[in-house]
Image (spheres, rainbow, N blue to C red):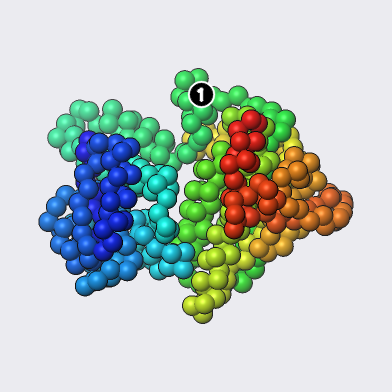
Amino acid sequence: MKYNILVADDDRFVHMFIENAIESEHHDYRIISAFNGQEACDLAFSQEVDLIIMDWEMPVMNGIDALDYIKSDPNTADIPIIVITSTGNLQTAFEAGAIDFIKKPLDRVELLVRVKSSLSMFKLIKSIVHQSEILEEQSIELEQKNARLEEEQEKTDTLLLNILPYEIAEQLKNKGSVDAKTYRRVSVLFTDFKGFTHISEELSPTEIIKELGIFFAQFDEIIGGHFIEKIKTIGDAYMCVGGLPLRNKSNPIDTVLAGLEMQEFVNELNDEKIKNGFKPWHLRLGIHTGRVVAGVIGKKKFAYDIWGDTVNTASRMESAGEIRKVNISGDTYKHIGEYFDCEHRGKIEAKNKGEIDMYFVHGLKPEYAEAGSKIKPNKKFLGILSEY
């Protein structure tokens, strides 16, 4: 299948960069070029477009106005749009209907990942809609096949409603059940927004879901880059774990790196909120490393979950933490202290756990971080991590 990608940017170098990056990776993409917002709208309405990559600042019509115009037309409203922007414009871009964003200066790897992700999502949605339409037509035209179609639809719905790790889903499909497993060393990460109850009282349900959606969508993306499995969200709490279902030794490092990225994202978004006169959402984040049992529960609605004292302790790390910081236990520190700049808090009282050694992680040590960053590993550290 050949995808048509509309690139809208007044900088010809950006067009060359995107075209070279995409076409060097795959020949199934055709680039359509626009150099201002109005031209982008005209092309979106006149040609079959599968994805739009649009700059924020353009002549004639800027990116946000073009985005609004495209999303307002039913014929183009479903086209996924990636906005090229700065961090400061993120909330406005999402509110206008952007599905994703790319920061300047453009990075080839990030560009390809976001393009593939957006196209895959668009293809899946189109496929599901198309399949549903076919099933509905067959149900009307062929009454004798109703039972079979309903059964297949139920199976499809079940798969869509129950998101499981790939390995677990395969085991469930092949065996009809999933055996519970003990993992001797995983790292559990919890987040929670301080004062969420008070915040929720000032917002409508739609606004709350929208705000949480922005945060959790970015958290999903962050942990996806660190081999971490999302377990669930409960209200404003987010829970994930590194080191399962595929075992690895790097999970304490993976989760700490992810935690630092999460806090950085939230802090940057909060700075924007404050600048625009909105109240910030302050995040607490805690990590603990230890043993858990993992398995699938439920018969109709399957859920992959983890149990054990490690989970409870990780939750205590979050509640005993402070906003804008990554709080870890001594057990996690033992595995990451060599590489990260950590502040020993001493033994802190944790509910129903007694006193526990806790540390704040401020970032990677300078010798392991890229210049100008505390959370982005350099080549030296990536080499060390690859040996785990």
Residue at the image point whose x is 76% and y is 45% from the top: 337
In the rendered image, residue 321, in percent from the top left (x then y), is placed at 73, 59
In the image, residue 147 above or below residue 196: above
In the rendered image, residue 181, in percent from the top left (x then y), is placed at 65, 27
Residue type, label 1:
Gln
Viewer-closest of 125 and 16: 16
Q: Residue furthest left?
A: 46
Q: In the rendered image, which quarter is residue 58 located in?
A: bottom left
Q: Is residue 171 visible?
A: yes
Could you say whether the residue bearing mark 1 is in a helix, strand or loop? helix
Q: Is residue 234 visible?
A: no
For the N terminus, the image quarter is top left
- Label 1 Cα crowd, 10 Å radius (few <14 / some 14-19 / many 20+): few
In the rendered image, residue 171, in percent from the top left (x then y), is placed at 51, 24
Viewer-closest of 137 and 160: 160
For the C terminus, the image quarter is top right
Viewer-closest of 65 and 299: 65
Q: In the rendered image, which quarter is residue 135 located in?
A: top left
Q: Residue furthest top?
A: 175
Residue at the image point whose x is 31% and y is 38% from the top: 24
Residue at the image point whose x is 42% and y is 57% from the top: 105
Mark 1 sits on what residue?
171
In the image, residue 71 above or below residue 295: below
Viewer-closest of 200 and 45: 45
In the image, residue 150 above or below residue 100: above
Count all numbered tags in the image, as a single digit. 1
Residue at the image point whose x is 39% and y is 63% from the top: 85
In the rendered image, residue 191, in percent from the top left (x then y), is placed at 63, 54
Q: In the rendered image, which quarter is residue 265 located in?
A: bottom right
